[in-house]
Image (cartoon, helix red, strand yellow):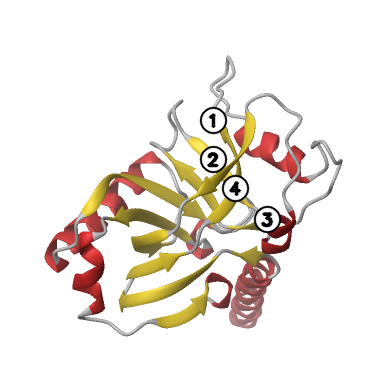
Amino acid sequence: MKRAMIYFAGFLGVALVGTFALAMSTRAGYESAEYKVIESDGSFEVREYPDLMLVATDSEMDSQGRDGSFMRLFQYISGANEDEQKIAMTTPVFMEGEIGKSDVSMGFVMPKEVAAEGAPNPKAEGVKLRERKGGRFAVIRFPGKLDSKLAKQKEAELREWMESRGLESEKTAEAAGYDPPFTPAALRRNEILIRLKESSKETENSKSKINSVSAQDS
């Protein structure tokens, strides 16, 4: 019995390590939106993003309350565009609005090469290309299943941290998810981002040294 428990514990440990490795390798396999870290404080950061090209769509709930936003965007990168071009998946998936509600806009980041050459126009109604304007953002990073309750909790924590730093921000927040649905909740990388007002830049410049990183590195 004791030996069996030891074997089981060993098997469980190997399985957990394997699951972690799979999650990390899957995330690392995608091109990720680049940014510069202006300040880092535990799970909080101030980042500077360049302009990004997104393919985006608004939530459309069906009669059973299911939203097909992800699939509409996935179909676009799978060839449902005017050039029938297949486009690589990237991270993160950005979401603007309250998660789980009908007014959420979801966006996939276009790979740098595709954005530079000009992304093909979508075929589907309700799917569009748009620019995500660059700038500085306060960010909190956290694991878990990204739902409305968790997003609100983390946004409140982020705003409290921002207030302690004297950072002025825009009213709205956006969420970002980096992992496919099969990733265990405890291993997922989620973020809440809040755009900072221009007046906050000088405050941060006096406190921090810019370190360039790619979101793909972590």
Could you say which disc has been placed on residue 58 in the image?
1
Relative placement, left or right, of 196 versus 9 is left
Contact, CB < 8 Å: mark 3 with mark 2? Answer: no
Q: From the viewer's perspective, is residue 15 above or below residue 108?
A: below
Relative placement, left or right, of 14 versus 150 is right
Q: Earlier in the sequence, mark 4 or mark 3?
A: 4
- The quadrant where residue 195 appears: bottom left
Alpha carbons under labels 4 and 2: distance apart: 9 Å
Alpha carbons under labels 1 and 2: distance apart: 6 Å
Q: Nearer the viewer, mark 3 or mark 1?
A: 3
Alpha carbons under labels 1 and 4: distance apart: 13 Å
**Residue 173: x %, y % from top left:** 34, 47
- The quadrant where residue 178 appears: bottom right
Query: Which residue of the protein is positioned furthest toward the top in this rendering?
Result: 63
Q: Residue at x 64, y 83 (%)?
A: 3
Q: Secondary structure at mark 1?
A: strand
Contact, CB < 8 Å: mark 1 with mark 2? Answer: yes
Three-letter code for the amino acid on which mark 4 is drawn: Leu
Alpha carbons under labels 3 and 2: distance apart: 18 Å
Q: From the viewer's perspective, is residue 83 above or below residue 59?
A: below
Residue hosting label 2: 106
Mark 2 Cα-neighbour bin, 10 Å: few <14, some 14–19, many ≥20: many
Could you say which disc has been placed on residue 54 in the image?
4
Q: From the viewer's perspective, is residue 11 above or below residue 201?
A: below
Residue hosting label 3: 115
In this view of the protein, can residue 156 be seen by the observer?
A: no
Which of the two residues, 137 or 198, is positioned nearer the viewer here?
A: 198
Q: Secondary structure at mark 3?
A: helix
Q: Residue at x 83, y 41 (%)?
A: 79
